[in-house]
Amino acid sequence: MPGNTIEKGDLMRSRKAALRAEIGLFIAALLLFCLCGAALLYRQVLEENKDPTIEIEFSDSGVAVTPYDPYAVYVEPETNRVTILQKGEYLLTGSAEEGQVVVALSKNKKVNLELAGLSLHCSTGPAIWVRSADKATITLAGKTVNFLSDGMDYAGEAIAENEECDACVFSQCDLDIRGSGALSVQGAYRDAIHSKGDLQIKKASVIAEAPYAGLHAKTVQMNKATLELSCYTYGILAKSKKPEKGWVEADTTSLVVEAGMAGIKTSGDLRLPQSNMVQIQSETPMDCAGTMQVEKMPAWMQNS
């Protein structure tokens, strides 16, 4: 009989342990369900409170902003000059023989400008001018071709001593250009594209012409991009006083350069892995002050 009592006690203890385990599993499942529900609710709240994309459509008769938000976008009457004042997503479309996009954000804010069939000329300054922001992104919408051009003489704020504007696309901060669309930049004043920070071009097609440099930045990184640069002086110029900057790097990129003085000029390193297709015609195809890591010499490279 004592043996039966012990067996019954063990059985009761095992049943209690199993019950506790089942209760623990139920509570864990309930907590997981609550957490998943809270996460979905939080995501829904974020989506509902996300700032809508603002569309800016240019025409020779004016600029249409939808939805209109005077705190986010300011349009100067009769000039087609648009100033973006808030972070967020902006869709730029339409065509104007005279117009300008200016980004003036706090230096800790980011902006994305999506170009979807935009054709814009500015005779007095950059067609796209990022005066202040933490980072600017230009996204080229798929199956669209976009055209930007500037004039030979800048005027007004663009030539103020503290601005240093010198490019059709000019940015005071880091600039990313990406997307599956195409961009043609006709720089008449000095550079085609100039970032005072770092410049990255990813999965985009860019054609640029300029009297000085096609691409100009502290560092230039190209990834799965297609570029055609035709410039009187430099195709690509990477220049910085910081020793860790001033480099150019390309990966799986098609690069065709025709330039007067140098196809690619760097104050730092030049890295061209084997995955690239590079063609350069210039007085000095590659002028590298740092280490030149070229795994495969350009398919076509000659002195002009």
Image: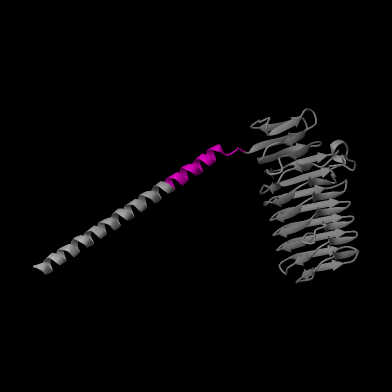
Image location (x, y in percent) of residue 76: 77, 30
Image location (x, y in percent) of residue 18: 26, 59
- Magenta stretch: helix, strand or loop mostly: helix
| Residue shown at 80% from the left, 61% from the top | 243
Query: Is residue 26 left or right of 250 when viewed as pictured?
Result: left
Q: Is residue 95 magenta?
A: no
Query: Is residue 25 left or right of 75 when viewed as pictured?
Result: left
Residue 245 higher or lower than 196, as above or below: below
Q: How is the image coloured?
A: one colour
Question: Of all residues shown, which one is farthest toward the front?
Answer: 2
Q: Is residue 48 magenta?
A: yes
Foreground pick, 5 / 142: 5
Foreground pick, 29 / 70: 29
Image location (x, y in percent) of residue 172: 78, 46
Name the image quarter holding residue 157: top right
Count all numbered tags in the image, as a single digit.
Answer: 0
Residue 189 higher or lower than 240, as above or below: above
Question: Of all residues shown, which one is farthest toward the left?
Answer: 1
Foreground pick, 283 / 207: 283
| Residue shown at 85% from the left, 55% from the top | 230
Which residues fall within the magenta stretch? 36-52
Q: Quadrant of the N terminus?
A: bottom left
| Residue shown at 79% from the left, 46% from the top | 169
Image location (x, y in percent) of residue 93: 70, 39
Residue 269 higher or lower than 230, as above or below: below
Name the image quarter holding residue 226: bottom right
Q: Quadrant of the C terminus?
A: bottom right
| Residue shown at 75% from the left, 62% from the top | 249
